[in-house]
Amino acid sequence: MNNITRDSFTSRFGIIAAAAGSAIGLGNIWKFPYITGKYGGAAFIILYLICIFLIGFPVMLSEFIIGRRTQKNAIGAFKSLSPDKPWYLTGWAGVAAAFFILSFYSVVGGWTIDYVIRSLTGNFINKTPTEIVNTFESFISNPVMPVIWQIIFMILTCLIVLGGIKNGIEKYSKIMMPILFILIIILDIRALTLDNSIQGISFIFRPDWSLLTPEAVLVALGHAFFSLSLGMGTMTTYASYINKKENLTQTAFRVTILDTVIALLAGIAIFPAVFAFEIEPTSGPGLVFVTLPGIFQMLPLGMFFSTLFFVLLAVAALTSAISLLEVPVAFFVEEKGMERRVAATLTTLIITIIGIFASLSQGILSNVKIFNLNIFNFLEFTSSNILLPSGGLLITLFVGWYLNRRDVEEELSNNGRIRISSLSFFLLAVKIVSPALIIIVFLNGLGIIR
Ligand code: TRP
């Protein structure tokens, strides 16, 4: 691939919007609240923050280094840094993970669009909490509508990716991310002014350590990877479009902070409502789909806020989905010489088909089990808890032990033009701290060590 014609981001704001757009998604707004509810509130959040800063941030910076150094896709990057060793298999695992993740991600993405329409048309008005739970359950197990929405969600994702980096991904992220930020602030203000909001707030800020099981630790680590879009080459691919003048450490830090802040803001928007309306905080993946419509329909301008919330969720999902799709697309274009149009259409098609099965596994295919999980849960569990952490482990080991120290220094300092203050901290993190923690948490969570 010729570097002169290679597409790239055009502005610093565009880079942050796209990378934060990838990181901030259903993971922050849909998944973070329900796993926080399930694993003990504040105790889980503290653990999660430790994973984010000790492991997530160094892994993100490692991916940035690999991507910008080589200006190549997830697999090509490893091939060019290590032509005669099998490190490129890390990239392969990443491309596979992109298919896994986007297949179930697009199902939930589809649900969000359906909920935008339902809110707009007043579908939740005068429904009791139980009726709203039933609406959700009968909707996701329906064999037709969720599939149609999932296909529409994938078509939207594909259309943006077809536009390329500056005219597709960057352009849309720059519009959608500020909208998302404003929406979440409005919803936070709404939540904090509910009666009893204090109960919800204390749930996310007061730790109950007794709920912290080994499984919770594995989930916190897996979610740190998932939420920051790490361990499968998304950030490697995006960094390959970052110009040589940007400060990578600063960019990674900003993206990490933004992602974390939005997750916390989402928690603040959701838990007061959960308690105000006496919904179980541990109610699982349906949490935001049942809590919020429930509350909103009892409030003045409820339909309006409900629509706003699901638009927020759909937008967040879309800017993440494009980053997932870009990984295989960049690979097919650069390594297999495919046209972008063909690569995007082909991958969208395959992912949509797997996604249909994931969607149907909420209903008519719920009896099909892989390792005791339905198709949707299998795709989710294996990608977050196995593929991403192992990808992350390989990436840190690669940067920490294999990659030339000079490559690392030149990328972090932009060839000596900017000062790097924390090189030894970073090296310690990628050589020892992150890999050791990932291995321990991994073995522990899988029940191999206790
Ligand atoms: N980070 C996104 C979220 O929180 C999802 C996502 C996008 C992702 N790209 C990724 C997860 C790459 C893992 C790897 O919703």
Image (cartoon, rainbow, N blue to C red):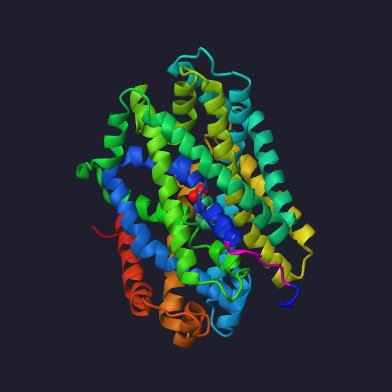
Residue 285 appears left or right of 364? left
Residue 350 appears left or right of 48? right
Q: Position of residue 253 (x, y in %)?
A: 43, 63
Q: Position of residue 242 (x, y in %)?
A: 60, 69
Q: Nearer the viewer, residue 337 or 84?
A: 337
Across the whole image, how many numbered discs are drawn on residues?
0
Name the residue located 65 percent from the left edge and 59 percent from the top edge: 326
Q: Position of residue 330 (x, y in %)?
A: 67, 65
Question: Which residue reaches farthest top?
Answer: 126
Q: State which region is magenta.
A: 6-12
Residue 180 appears left or right of 8? left
The quarter in which the C terminus is drawn is: bottom left
Residue 436 figure quarter:
bottom left
Q: Nearer the viewer, residue 384 or 373?
A: 384
Name the residue located 54 percent from the left edge and 39 percent from the top edge: 368
Residue 114 appears left or right of 348? left
- Is residue 274 magenta-colored? no
Whether residue 109 is visible here, answered yes or no, is yes
Task: Using the image, determine if residue 140 lies above or below residue 255.
Answer: above
Whether residue 370 is visible here, answered yes or no, is no
Residue 266 figure quarter:
top left
Q: Position of residue 249 (x, y in %)?
A: 45, 70
- Is residue 8 magenta-colored? yes
- The dominant secondary structure in magenta is loop
Q: Nearer the viewer, residue 260 or 445?
A: 260
Q: Nearer the viewer, residue 166 or 320?
A: 166
Name the residue located 29 percent from the left edge and 58 percent from the top edge: 444
The quarter in which the N terminus is drawn is: bottom right
